């Protein structure tokens, strides 16, 4: 069996186990569920976000209409797709643009806990933090990982005093960062 095929099979096994875990453990923390969904849908599919469509269909998710997706200028320009899924009575919005980036948005987003857990799973360092307006955007570079060195994890969340508990975790693969920097 060639190495690439073996890697793909391993990735699909990890995705299946991640999704099973989210569905099976009702006592799983909200933070763990948020990071697990992000990892299973976005991070593990970095080489082909089009796999997400099939994963969403497998759990009964629904496509978000193109008119709503096109409200985001980046998604409109890059031809993005977005879906909603419900796992353990919690809705997640998953959006991606093939060969660009992938994001998971949800409510009940404890930003400090999410960042702490992300740092446990992915070795990362803070490279930018923007606190203007009602939201906070934190950008982290993945380090010490031969496959993902230079990739960016972005965590966006509403400020604590805003009364909003929605947040987003996004992944920009290293190849996307390199391509963007080379086009400047």
Image (cartoon, rainbow, N blue to C red):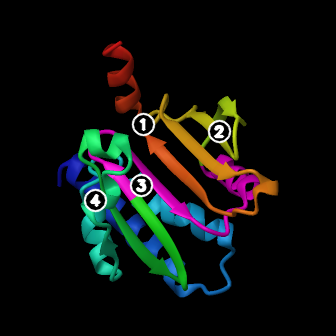
Marks 2 & 1, CB-CB < 8 Å contact: no
Disc assigned to residue 42: 3
Identified at 70% across, 35% down, the residue is 132
- Could you say which quadrant of the image residue 60 lies in? bottom left
Q: Secondary structure at mark 1?
A: loop
Marks 2 & 4, CB-CB < 8 Å contact: no
Regarding residue 45, the answer to whether it shows in the image is no
Identified at 65% across, 78% down, the residue is 28
Label 3 Cα crowd, 10 Å radius (few <14 / some 14-19 / many 20+) = many
Task: Please report whichever mark, 2 or 3, sits nearer to the chain's N-terminal start.
Answer: 3
- Could you say which quadrant of the image residue 147 lies in? top left
Label 2 Cα crowd, 10 Å radius (few <14 / some 14-19 / many 20+) = some
Disc assigned to residue 147: 1
* Of the two numbered discs 4 and 3 in the rendering, the one whose residue sits closer to the viewer: 4
Residue at numbered disc 2: 138
Q: Is residue 92 magenta?
A: no
Q: Depth check: 141 or 132 in front?
A: 132
Mark 1 vs mark 3, CA separation in Å: 15 Å
Q: Is residue 100 magenta?
A: yes
Magenta range is: 95-121
Marks 4 & 3, CB-CB < 8 Å contact: no
Mark 1 vs mark 4, CA separation in Å: 35 Å
Figure quadrant of the C terminus: top left
Residue at numbered disc 4: 67
Mark 2 vs mark 1, CA separation in Å: 22 Å
Q: Position of residue 134 (x, y in %)?
A: 70, 46
């Amino acid at each position: 069996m060639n190495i690439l095929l073996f890697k793909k099979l391993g990735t699909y096994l990890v995705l299946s186990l991640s999704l099973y875990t989210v569905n099976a453990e009702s006592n799983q923390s909200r933070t763990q569920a948020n990071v697990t969904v992000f990892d299973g849908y976005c991070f593990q599919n970095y080489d082909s976000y089009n796999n997400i469509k099939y994963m969403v269909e497998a759990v009964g998710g629904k496509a978000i209409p193109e008119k709503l997706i096109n409200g985001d200028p980046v998604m409109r320009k890059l031809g993005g797709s977005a879906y909603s899924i419900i796992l353990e009575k919690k809705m997640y919005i998953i959006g991606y643009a093939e060969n660009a980036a992938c994001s998971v948005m949800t409510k009940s987003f404890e930003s400090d806990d999410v960042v702490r857990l992300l740092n446990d799973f992915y070795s990362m360092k803070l490279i930018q933090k923007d606190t203007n307006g009602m939201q906070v955007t934190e950008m982290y570079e993945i380090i010490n990982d031969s496959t993902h060195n230079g990739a960016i994890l972005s965590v966006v969340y509403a400020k604590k005093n805003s009364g909003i508990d929605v947040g987003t975790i996004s992944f920009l693969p290293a190849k996307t960062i390199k391509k963007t920097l080379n086009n400047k």
